Amino acid sequence: MRKLHFTHCKKLQFDTPVVSHSFSLRLVPATDSRQIICDLEKEVTPAEHLADVTDEWGTTMCIGDCYAEHDTFSYSVSGIAWVKDTPYIEGPLHPIYRYPSELTRPGEYIEQMYAQAALDAQTSQERAEAWMHLIYSSMTYEKGVTDIHTTAEEVAAAGKGVCQDYAHLMLALCRRDGIPARYVVGYLHGEGETHAWVEIFDGSRWCGLDPTHDRLINSGYISLTNGRDYNDCILDKGFFHTPGYEIHKVTQTQQVRVVVEDM
């Protein structure tokens, strides 16, 4: 097994102080049949209340509040992951992964892509790998042309995007082909930021595929959370008010650092 140390830090700066800040954070990778997580440390500042809960997809979610006035908010998590050099993860299938989600619903462009592919592969994994190769050859990796609301259909039409978009397009094609598939967010050795990929269910287990890099996942991947699409896997979200609860636009700037290195 490969021993990796991971660190994920984020700092938000508000241009005006805020109060009554409630948040939910998906920060904790889970131990499963492919990875073992240990020596975990996390810090959230400021926080007057913190609690760990499990979301509907089995991810540990840290929820909390800070009622006092503050103009910065930060969190960090670090730990060690022992990772097998395999793309396979044991676990049951939730039937919802068979069906389109909000961001992966097929339209005209995905239907054209699906109809023109004419795959010869037979097994679920073989067909998923064929879809992955097609997406990789059809797409151009480009930052700044999509956002968190961009759908798989819009990605198919544009032919460009980032890892989130590659994953959404693959989810759409796999589900259209009858292959259960889920969206995964995690860390990739050497990437410097969070990464998204896909896991398909082959009838008995999950198999991880990365359409952005056109390969099965390996020991450099640490899974953090999964769901139907990006909307189920938002790592941090929350809401707050300005002092006096007056209506006021608050601008946020952020700094993010992700490091995954061998030990």
Image (tube, rainbow, N blue to C red):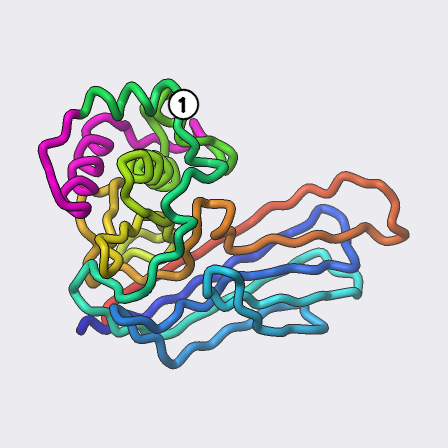
Q: Is residue 121 magenta?
A: yes
Left or right of 104 on screen, residue 85: left
Residue 193 against residue 142 in the figure, above or below: below
Residue 261 in the image: x percent, y percent? Answer: 27, 65
At 44% from the left and 45% from the top, the residue drawn is: 229
Dot 1, crowdedness within 10 Å: few (<14), some or many (≥20)?
A: some
Residue found at the very far right of the displayed protein: 244
Magenta span includes 117: no
Quarter that holds the N terminus: bottom left
* Residue lying furthest left: 120
User: Residue at point 20% right, 20% down?
Assistant: 116
The picture quadrant where one finds residue 38 is: bottom left
Q: Is residue 225 above or below residue 120?
A: below
Which quadrant holds residue 48? bottom right
Residue at 35% across / 35% down in the picture?
A: 172
Stretch in magenta: 118-146
Task: Give how far across and how far down residue 47 sits, in percent.
Answer: 68, 70
Q: Residue at point 32% right, 22% down?
A: 111
**In front of the other: 255 or 30:** 30
Pointer 1 residue? 107
